[in-house]
């Protein structure tokens, strides 16, 4: 699946996107955040406050308990503000 990173999440990870194949036990967005966080210090820093990270699966906003099976694209971004 393709993973995209936006705003300060992208800056901390050091890339805008990548293609990954998480292990079978990674089943939800929350699991994916945990798995990504363990990859390196950069990922750990990007996801150090997982409750503030927002996610979208195939361009639809989802909660951390959303299943990732069959997802083509998952995006991570900080909270959005503005008007």
Image (spheres, rainbow, N blue to C red):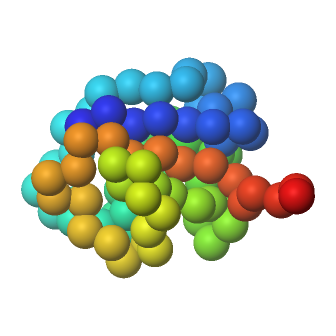
- The answer to which image quadrant residue 43 occupies is top right
**As drawn, which residue projects farthest toward the front?**
83
Q: Quadrant of the C terminus?
A: bottom right
Relative placement, left or right, of 6 versus 55 is right
* Residue positioned 71% across, 29% down in the render: 11
Relative placement, left or right, of 76 versus 22 is right
Relative placement, left or right, of 73 versus 8 is left
The foreground one among 39 and 81 is: 81
Q: Quadrant of the N terminus?
A: top left
Q: Residue 32 at what x, y percent from top left?
A: 36, 56
Q: Residue 33 at what x, y percent from top left?
A: 45, 57
**Height in image: 39 above or below 82?**
above
Relative placement, left or right, of 81 versus 55 is right
**Height in image: 42 above or below 38?**
above
Can residue 17 be seen at all in this image of the molecule?
yes
Q: Residue 75 at what x, y percent from top left?
A: 47, 45
The foreground one among 34 and 59 is: 59
Give the total number of marks visible in the rendering. Answer: 0
* Residue positioned 24% across, 41% down in the render: 72
* Residue positioned 16% across, 58% down in the render: 69
**As drawn, which residue projects farthest toward the right?**
83
Q: Residue 6 at what x, y percent from top left?
A: 63, 37
* Residue positioned 34% across, 48% down in the render: 58
Can residue 34 be seen at all in this image of the molecule?
no
């Amino acid at each position: 699946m393709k993973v995209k990173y936006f705003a300060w999440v992208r800056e901390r990870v050091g890339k805008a996107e990548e293609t990954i194949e998480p292990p079978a036990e990674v089943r939800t967005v929350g699991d994916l955040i945990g798995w990504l966080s363990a990859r390196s210090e950069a990922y750990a820093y990007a996801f150090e406050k997982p409750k503030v990270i927002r996610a979208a699966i195939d361009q639809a906003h989802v909660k951390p308990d959303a299943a990732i099976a069959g997802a083509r694209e998952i995006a991570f971004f900080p909270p959005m503000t503005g008007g």
